[in-house]
Amino acid sequence: MGKFNNRPNTPHKLNDGRIIWESRSVAVVACVFALCDKELYVLSGKRGKGAFDSNGKWNLPCGYLDFDEDGKEAVMREVYEETGLDLSQYLGTHQLVINNLDNPWFVNTQPTENRQNVALRYGCVIKVHKLPELTNEHSELDEVESLEWIHEDFIEDYDWAFEHSKVIKKYLDIIDITHLL
């Protein structure tokens, strides 16, 4: 067998005898678009002073996979916590016109990127008559400074964390919304 370029995960023994493993984290990222009056908007938040990094920059709702949840649950939870948008209300309805919530549309495992996080990108497009109200009341203290539905024409006007403007463009490239307009 060949030589592998890895560093083994580190075990830590807890006081109760259980062992937990220090390993790479899994991050989930949500590309949520709203189609309203034939205009497309992306759900976004400005990182507050309580965010770990990239304070003052814009980002897509994102966070880490918790114990006992799958990727879909994690991404829906992160969207709700950071923006107040409950994506479950759209599941199984005609308003969810593009659904990439069951499985990620992109997986990045490169150790050279984003503190070695494994990133799972999910997405969806909801069709609405009015843009849903947003709130940061469920987020961690000062994690989210402000929230916006950003029109697709103005995405480049914002200062994005984690190269999320590229993530947005990539998702728009793989979905076909022309039939919805």
Image (cartoon, rainbow, N blue to C red):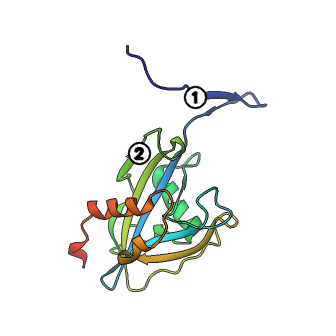
Is residue 98 rendered to the left or right of residue 109? left
Image: 10 above or below 177: above
Is residue 176 rendered to the left or right of residue 76? left
Image: 170 above or below 108: below
Quadrant where the N terminus lies? Answer: top left
Q: Amino acid at mark 1?
A: Asn
Secondary structure category for the residue under label 2:
strand
149, 53: nearer the viewer: 53
Q: Position of residue 163 (x, y in %)?
A: 44, 58
5, 128: nearer the viewer: 5
Residue drawn at point x = 54 percent, y = 44 percent? 115
* Residue furthest out toward the left: 179
Q: Which mark is residue 25?
A: none
Residue drawn at point x = 59 percent, y = 45 percent? 67
Q: Which mark is residue 9?
A: 1
Secondary structure category for the residue under label 1:
loop
79, 168: nearer the viewer: 168
Q: Amino acid at mark 2?
A: Asn
Image: 90 above or below 130: above
Q: Position of residue 76 (x, y in %)?
A: 50, 61
* Of pointers 2 and 1, the one earlier in the residue sequence: 1
Q: CA distance from mark 2 to mark 1?
A: 19 Å
Image: 171 above or below 134: above
* Residue furthest out toward the right: 15
Badge 2 crowding class, 10 Å Cα cut-off, few under 14, some 14 to 19, many 20 or more, is some
Q: Position of residue 145 (x, y in %)?
A: 62, 72
Quadrant of the rendered structure where residue 156 is? bottom left
Quadrant of the rendered structure where residue 175 is? bottom left
Q: Which mark is residue 108?
A: 2
